């Protein structure tokens, strides 16, 4: 079995090595036709830029790095030239921001200019990257069914291993995660070859060439599937965890990946039916509202569904089942945290200081999202252009851009996932997700969900606190016999799954206000005998 695991490690390493190595290889050649089409699509009017760039890149074989560098340097030179003129023609100025230059301006040309082995052998390329990584990952995890022995939770040195206790392997993993997200969000022109690996899958589903977002979606589902196998094996003693993992995997693959791609194949809007505002912060943006309204009955249904999901379904479901119905059973962010992030759940900070930061930060993001959405709807219905300055030289477009950059990209992606091996697997869910904050307010004050505790049976082993991904010191509640109704609790149930005495139970009881948080009498020693005698006398 160990030999099989070692083979799996080798195959996984090869898959990742091919994937990463392809970023620094490959050939790109811009044809006159491709260049002309790109200039027209981008609306470039600067003759200086067109002339200089054409001489540098057209009909020349370049790497992605060389091609991107020449385009960006020509754009900067063109702007400097235009500003040096006696009268500046602002129509010829290229309005470029570093966060958008590569992904919106450069990437389309680089993507269309790819030539050579990667474009001609996409099937083989898919196998050498995703194929080897998936097969290798399965070979790593499946032998654990035998190697781990009888079913039941085992810590297995998680605080001693370099990969799971902020060691060198953990930091290398974090560096890889962060690097991938930076390329994905801001520099997709450098990952064209990895994107080509899933080009065949994209064309089969929607008929369109793969984009960086399709690559991300396919990788997301692949990683969740492989690590879901690990979850099935690790938590095979707990039916709740088995079912929960299967359900959240289904929602991610079906609702967040396959259905939206199939909708695009039928010329319908891309739409994730499970993604609610404010997590889906672009739902009320003007371009999305116009797209849905102009897409016929199905588009109107999507619009109504999104509003009903946010305003009615989410709070009602939280009242009956707590945040767990969404955060642990439906949400893709939570699904990745529970599968890929499970080895890092013990790294969540349990300190009071961390709890204070969490409350201020996550509710601050919710306020930010609410204000942005309110302003967005105001200018939409008032028919004010989103780029028009409203106050202090700031436009709604500026606010949307700031939110998309700092929250939608940096916080949720680069930090939220990239820092799994450093800060634990629920960084985004705990500190940044505005939907989690919204549901948490309902759960804390008006919900039937709670985790009940039996302090009399607690042996203070600390497994529950160790495995709590949300940074809750569960043991302190269990020792006092106090129900856990923290707004941050996502009801993953792992604390209950790892408890050796069955002290913790996830329950949906009557909403009786203060009784949800009151401390029960902790029965110890002779108190238990006295209770038994009292019951007999009754």
Image (cartoon, rainbow, N blue to C red):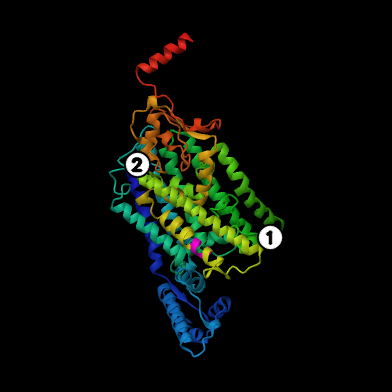
Q: Nearer the viewer, mark 1 or mark 2?
A: 1
* Labels 1 and 2: the sequence-earlier one: 2
> Considering the numbered disc 1 on the image, is that residue within a helix, a strand or a loop?
helix
| Percent position of residue 192, x then y | 46, 67
The quadrant in which the N terminus is found is top left
> Considering the numbered disc 2 on the image, is that residue within a helix, a strand or a loop?
loop
Q: Is residue 422 left or right of residue 386?
A: left
Say above or below: 161 vs 218.
above
**In the image, which residues are magenta?**
400-404
Q: Which mark is residue 293?
A: 1
Q: Main secondary structure of the magenta part?
A: helix
Q: Quadrant of residue 158?
A: top left
Residue at point 46%, 41% (across, down): 489
Say above or below: 340 vs 99.
above
Mark 1 burial class by Cα count in 10 Å: few <14, some 14-19, many 20+ = some
Mark 2 burial class by Cα count in 10 Å: few <14, some 14-19, many 20+ = some
| Foreground pick, 36 / 117 | 36
| Foreground pick, 382 / 134 | 382
| Percent position of residue 193, x then y | 45, 66
**Residue 283 shows up from this direction:** yes
Disc 1/disc 2 C-alpha distance (Å): 56 Å
Q: Quadrant of residue 300?
A: bottom right
Name the residue that disc number 2 marks. Answer: 1
Residue at point 39%, 21% (across, down): 523
């Amino acid at each position: 079995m160990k030999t099989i695991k070692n083979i799996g490690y080798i195959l996984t390493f090869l898959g990742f090595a091919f994937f990463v190595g392809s970023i620094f290889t490959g050939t790109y050649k811009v044809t006159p036709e491709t260049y002309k089409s790109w200039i027209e699509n981008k609306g470039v009017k600067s003759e200086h830029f067109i002339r200089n760039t054409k001489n540098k890149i057209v009909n020349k074989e370049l790497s992605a790095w060389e091609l991107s560098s020449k385009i960006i340097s020509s754009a900067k030179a063109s702007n400097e030239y235009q500003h040096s003129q006696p009268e500046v023609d602002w129509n010829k100025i290229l309005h470029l921001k570093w966060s958008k230059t590569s992904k919106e301006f450069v990437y389309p040309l680089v993507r269309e200019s790819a030539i050579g082995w990667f474009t001609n052998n996409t099937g083989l390329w898919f196998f050498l990257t995703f194929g080897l990584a998936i097969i290798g990952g399965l070979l790593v995890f499946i032998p654990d069914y035998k190697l781990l022995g009888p079913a039941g939770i085992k810590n297995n040195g998680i605080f001693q291993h370099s990969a799971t206790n902020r060691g060198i392997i953990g930091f290398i993993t974090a560096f890889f995660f962060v690097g991938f997200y930076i390329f994905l969000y801001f520099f997709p022109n450098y990952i064209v070859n990895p994107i080509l690996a899933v080009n065949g899958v994209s064309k089969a589903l929607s008929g369109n060439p793969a984009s960086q977002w399709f690559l991300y979606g396919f990788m997301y589902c692949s990683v969740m599937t492989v690590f879901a196998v690990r979850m099935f094996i690790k938590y095979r003693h707990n039916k709740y965890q088995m079912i929960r993992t299967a359900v959240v995997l289904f929602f991610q693959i079906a609702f967040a990946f396959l259905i939206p791609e199939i909708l695009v194949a039928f010329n319908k809007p891309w739409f994730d039916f499970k993604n609610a505002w404010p997590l889906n912060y672009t739902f009320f943006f003007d371009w999305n509202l116009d797209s849905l309204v102009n897409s016929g009955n199905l588009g109107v249904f999507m619009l109504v569904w999104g509003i009903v999901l946010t305003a009615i379904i989410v709070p009602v479901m939280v009242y009956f089942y707590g945040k767990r119905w969404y955060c642990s059973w439906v949400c893709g962010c939570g699904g990745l945290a529970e599968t890929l992030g499970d080895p890092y759940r013990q790294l969540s900070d349990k300190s009071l200081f961390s709890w204070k930061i969490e409350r201020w930060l996550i509710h601050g993001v919710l306020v930010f999202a609410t204000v942005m959405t309110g302003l967005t709807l105001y200018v939409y219905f008032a028919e004010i252009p989103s780029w028009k300055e409203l106050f202090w030289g700031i436009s709604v477009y500026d606010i949307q851009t700031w939110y998309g950059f700092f929250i939608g990209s940096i916080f949720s992606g680069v930090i939220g996932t990239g820092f799994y091996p450093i800060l634990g697997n629920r960084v985004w869910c705990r500190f940044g997700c505005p939907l989690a904050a919204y549901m948490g307010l309902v759960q804390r004050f008006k919900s039937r969900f709670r985790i009940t505790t039996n302090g009399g049976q607690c042996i203070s082993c600390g497994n529950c606190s160790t495995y709590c991904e949300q940074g809750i010191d569960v043991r302190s509640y269990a020792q006092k016999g106090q129900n856990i109704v923290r707004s941050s609790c996502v009801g993953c149930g792992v604390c209950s799954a790892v408890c050796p005495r069955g002290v913790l139970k996830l329950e949906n009881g009557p909403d009786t206000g203060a009784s949800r948080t009151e401390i029960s009498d902790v029965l110890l020693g002779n108190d238990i005998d006295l209770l038994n005698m009292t019951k007999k006398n009754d």
